[in-house]
Image (spheres, grey):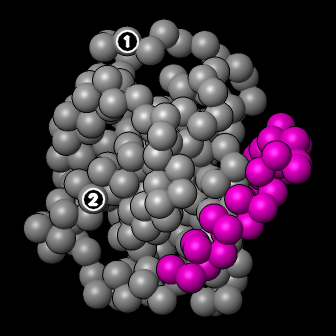
Amino acid sequence: MVALLATTLVVGATVQGLIGLGVGMVSAPVVTLLEPSLMPGMLLCMGLATPLVTLLHEHHDIDWRGLSWALPMRVIGTAVGLYLVATVSERSLGLGVAIMVLLGVLVTLRSVRLPVNRLTLSVVGVVSGVTGTTTSISGPPIAVLYQHHAASRIRCTLAVYFAVGASLSLIGLAATGQLTAAEVGIGALLLPALVVGVLIARVLRGRLPSDSIRGGVLVVCAASALLLLVRSVA
């Protein structure tokens, strides 16, 4: 199981290093299928570590103005997410992960253009706070807003957003007794997989068309999410 989780995380970190998000979308369905008790804490640990590794190498094009609106609103979303984590069943968690991944795939396939302003940033902050805390997947909402920006701005801005957001969710889960030692321990054990993925992304960046990489990843994400959806419903 650990080997499969590590492989999944390498793929997710590679994708995130290329297009700005990917660890949650790629890994959440697999983790929820294999060991739902590790959700969402383990992937939130990954969601904190991956952007920090990214920011060590790339931090020159961060949209601090946009983050100043999105991050405070994420606190509200995190509070709602903590309530849901305490009340929903593993089956409902599986459904939530599957639906979020499928929505993320659909949104990514359709080139939706939304204005980046105070209203959209605030709404995205709340929504991603809820989904990030409950399913560890906070990328799609914020990625939709920034998908038409330069690749470096997307990677840098999303890295800061994911790092701060994951920290908020982890602190909240720990404070309410919903973060287990197993989630943190296995997360720490799998940290090398994230580093490998980020390094692979640095090698591939500029050599492979991001659209072709994204297309393959979306197929894998959709297939995993559909399998998880069927299992949760059944």
Compared to residue 58, the image places residue 94 above or below, namely: below
Q: For the stretch drawn in magenta, what is the main secondary structure?
A: helix
Q: Which mark is residue 50?
A: none
Which of these two is toward me, 50 or 184? 50
Q: Amino acid at mark 1?
A: Asn
CB within 8 Å, label 1 to label 2: no
Q: Which mark is residue 167?
A: 2
Which of these two is toward me, 149 or 130? 149
In the rendering, at what x and y percent does residue 212 appear? 88, 43
Residue 60: say if magenta. Answer: no
Q: Which residues are magenta?
A: 191-220
Decide if residue 48 is in sight here. yes
Q: Residues within 10 Å of mark 2 (few under 14, many from 20)?
A: some
Q: Which residue position holds label 1?
A: 117
Q: Which corner quadrant holds the C terminus?
A: bottom right
Q: Quadrant of residue 166?
A: bottom left
Residue at the (66%, 75%) spot, across then down: 196
| SS class, disc 1 | loop
Decide if residue 224 is in sight here. no
Which of these two is toward me, 70 or 104? 70
Residue 218: say if magenta. Answer: yes
In the rendering, at what x and y percent does residue 112 appear? 64, 17
Q: Which corner quadrant holds the N terminus?
A: bottom right
| SS class, disc 2 | helix
Q: Earlier in the sequence, mark 1 or mark 2?
A: 1
Residue at the (53%, 12%) spot, across then down: 114
Q: CA distance from mark 1 to mark 2?
A: 24 Å
